[in-house]
Amino acid sequence: MTPFDMTRPLADRRTVLKALAGGALTASLPFVSPAAAAPLAELTLYGPPAGPSVTLTHGIAIDAFTAIADRTSFRAWRNPDELRAGLTSGTMASLVAPIQLGANLYNRGLGVRLLTTMTNGLLYIISTDPEVTDLASLRGKTLAAPFRNDLPDLILNSLLRYEGMTPGTDLTVQSTGSPIESIQMLVLGRVDAALVPEPAATAATIRGAALGVDIHRAVDIQQVWGTVTRREPILPQAGFMVTDAFLDGHADLLEPLHQALSRAVDDAIADPAAAAANAADALNMPSDVVAASIPHSNLVAVRATESRSAIEAMLTVLAEADPAVIGGHVPDADFYL
C-alpha cells in the first residue's frame, strides 16, 4: 500500500467556514450562543458498541442536542468495515470513530474532520492466568485480539514492538471478529488472555465471576502507552467526527455539538447509573455492566485542536512500522476542527 501525500488547498469559502468553526475569528465577531444556531430537523449520531457511545446515547436522553436538531437518534456501527462503508458512501456524516481511521481517510482525501476527542483510552488485556500481569508475561502465551489491522491490533503491535516481542515468535496472537468473540475464547480456555475495550472488559470480569472463572485486568494499555511514549498515559483512541459535507452545510453547529458532547460526558461521569440505563440497549449490554465500565473508559470531550499533540504522538508511534496505516503521514492542521 503506497503512502499518500494529500496536502490539499482549500477554497476561500471552506477557509472561512473552518475559521468560524474553530473560533479563529472570535476576536472580531460578536458572541453567538450555541442556541442561536439554526437546528436541523433530524440528526443521526453513529458510534461503536463501546464506551464513547455512552456519551452519545446519554446526551440524547438528557436533551443535550436540542440546540442542534429537533430530533436526534443513535445508530451503532458494529465493525470497522461497516464504519468505512458508511464514511465512504456519505451515509454517516456525524459519528464517533477511531482517530487513526479518521486520519487515514482524511489523508486520502475522503473528507473526514475531527471535532472532539471522546476517550483517552479504553483498552485492557484481561486474563484467567494469574501469571499474566504485564506484556512481558505474555511470552509463550496465546492472546486473542479483535479486528486484525485495525486500531486495537495496531496499538497492540506497536506496544509489543517496543517490548521487543514478535507475534508468532514470542507469543501467539489469535485474531477475532469482535471483542465478544475474544472473551468467549478466554472463558472457554482457548486463549490465555484477550485484548478488549470497555465495556467488554468489564462484561468479561462479571460474566467470568458468574461462571466461576476468575478473569482479571492484567494490563492497562493506557499506562503501558504512557511508558512507551514517555508521556502521560493518554491514548486518544476515538473521537467525534463530521464529514466535509456536514461542515459545508452546518459549520455553525460545530461549537454547539462540542458543547453538547461536553455536557453529556460530564453528566454521564457524574451519574453512571443513569447513563448506563440510557446506553444499555444501544450497546446491547446490561446496564449494570455499562455502569461499572464507565470509570474504566476514560471518557472525555476535548476539542480536537487541544488534543492535537497527544493525537500526533499516538499516530507517529502507530506509523513507525507502516505509515500507510495513517494514510502516509500525520494529518495537517485542517484535520482538527
Image (spheres, rainbow, N blue to C red):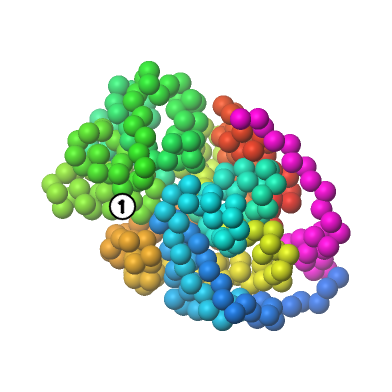
Residue 178 visible at all = yes
- The residues colored magenta run 1-27
| Image point (25%, 44%), residue name | 184
| Image point (46%, 21%), residue name | 164
Residue beneath disc 1: 202
**Quadrant placement of the C terminus:** bottom right
Q: Is 329 within the magenta?
A: no
Residue 292 located left or right of residue 83: left
Q: Is residue 199 above or below residue 144?
A: below
Find residue 276 and report its image quarter. bottom left
- Is disc 1 placed on a helix, strand or loop? helix
At which x and y percent is residue 314? 58, 40
> Between 311 and 182, which is closer to the camera in this rendering?
182
Badge 1, how many Cα within 10 Å: few under 14, some, many 20+? many
Name which residue type carries label 1: Thr
> Between 144 and 269, which is closer to the camera in this rendering?
144
Tag count: 1
At which x and y percent is residue 73? 48, 72
